[in-house]
Amino acid sequence: MGSIAAMPEIARVTLRQLLGRRRTLLLVLLSTLPVLLALAFRVAGETEIERFSRRIFDTISMTILLPLVAILFGSGAFGAEIDDGTIVYLLAKPVPRWVVVASKALSAIAIAILLTGGSTALAGFIDMVPAGGDGVLATEAQVLAMVVGSACYVSLFLALSLFTRRALVIGIGYMLVWEGALSLMLPGIANLSIRQYSLGAATAIYNLPLQETRLSAETAFLLAGVLVVASLAIATWRLMRFELPGGSD
Amino acid sequence: MTAPNPAATSPAASSPAGSIYDLGYRHYEGKRNGRAYAMWSLFVEGLRNVWGFGRPMTAKAAPFILAGLYALPAVFQLAFSSVIAQRVATTGQAANLLDYHSYFEDFYYLVTFFIVAQAPELVCRDQRYQVLPLYFTRSMGRIEYALSRLGSLATALFVLLLVPYVALFVGDVLMKPDTFAAIGDELPKALPSIPAAALIAVCLAALSLAISSFSPRRAYSAIGIVAYVLLMEAIPAAIYSIGQSGGWAWSDKLFLLTPITSLIGALSWLFGQPLDPEFVSGSLTAGAYLAASIASAGVFIAVLMYRYRRMPA
């Protein structure tokens, strides 16, 4: 059990790598945007659950904020170490690789949830809670969607970043092309879309008035769980065979 | 013994640059090609870099796959042009074809992805590995460096955007029975695609380079570009939607700040088409979007130059 003792330290180092001064400021700004828009909605007297869910939660928090933040943290958790070459020191320690992967994933997921979930909760609090009990449930459902989404995106792109240096760009491509364009054209993609897992999971608490939720809560939780476990397992497997990158970039 | 070696001193004494540190090495006496040539060299190097020439296959994958995907629908239509023409002739109904004016509107996300993937390649590496001082101590100045990089990306984008237009043109001409008459018919419709491609290329190149010049890490530059493009599309739409019920008459003016929607509006002006209500809402005219696109290109070029003028090298 001595190896688990390394987890807090690895997590601390990961957090420090992911949260530089200027970029944290930018990410915080990004996640305050839904809150600011929610304030604007409130000022205009729009506190309906439906309008808020469509205009702010769906188009900004779910489509832009969540993927950007989670892909950045997911691919950066190992990406920054590989780029800087400090992964050598990490791998040289007598710590099982699964512990390394688990602590990196946990800390990246935690800050992704903090930013996206926090922003969603605050925005929902401003706009939907005044609508009554349904508003509270809707806010909780949206925060749950962010939690599930953060876990999925971070695990998937953390695993991918151990295979290619361009995991982040691939992640952005996934977000723009797969989730953005193809899922509108091909509804069957729902089973392979993190966005749908998150929205599906949210229905466990409240049926958000969005037209395109396609998965039931059970399916969504199951698929999301499979994705997270499989990604982290693959990441561990890959890290056990990790070859230090050569000079060619 | 004190007589100096004439070969070592005479060129040094005449040239002002070498008089202090002249160690007696042989001097360069060839032609000096000057600033314009240095810019040209950097432009060519940048253009090759965007497409991954001179670099490993992995660097070529992203640009070529994206450019291929962007051109694919048009090339497909070209390949099947005779089949389409036959069907139109037999059934008598006009085929539902891709059109010049709506092509970018249909597939803009691939172009966006292209700038996200390739703009950081051009400017981030030089900052990260601190080679900028090596450029700036030569005849290449900071502004020249920024302009060369902008030229490279804009040219690469121009090629990417023009290929499907050319494929559409050839396909449409081949569909008609009389080739020469068809060229005459099609050319006026197709020609605006050249200024259209140029406008999109300059706007998106300026935007993406200006943003990516702020971070030496490619990852953060890429995130910055995506965040900017997506948010500047989503925020005006959200505010407009409240503004409509709240009676804020100014709220549709915010669409002028959108990067992609403005370009789509500007293309309507260039192609002489009405604005597509599916994409563009509000009371703004196509001409206003054109002005907004040009203005945004100007602003981003200014930001890029400002950034390079201030960059610690």
Image: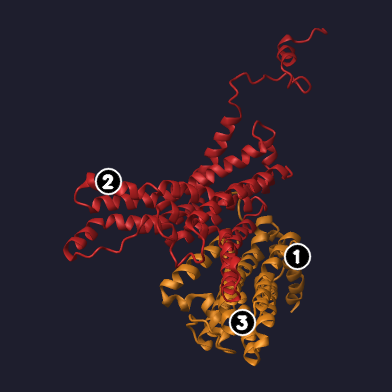
Same subunit, tags 3 and 1? yes
| Colour red belongs to chain | B
Q: Which residue is mark 3?
A: A142
Instruction: Using the image, name the chain to which the residue with label 1 belongs.
Output: A
| Residue type at the position of mark 3 | Gln
Q: Helix, strand or loop at disc 2?
A: helix
| Residue type at the position of mark 2 | Ile
Q: Position of residue A228 (x, y in %)?
A: 58, 77
Query: Camera-side residue: A166 or A35?
Result: A35
Residue B183: mark: 2
| Residue furthest bottom as drawn | A133
Scheme of image coloration: by chain
Residue A16: mark: 1
Quadrant housing residue A151: bottom right
Q: Is residue B248 above or below residue B37?
A: below
* Disc 1 versus disc 2: nearer the observer: 2
Same subunit, tags 1 and 2? no
* Disc 2 versus disc 3: nearer the observer: 2
Instruction: Using the image, name the chain to which the residue with label 3 belongs.
Output: A
Instruction: Using the image, name the chain to which the residue with label 2 belongs.
Output: B
* Disc 3 versus disc 1: nearer the observer: 3
Q: Helix, strand or loop at disc 1?
A: helix
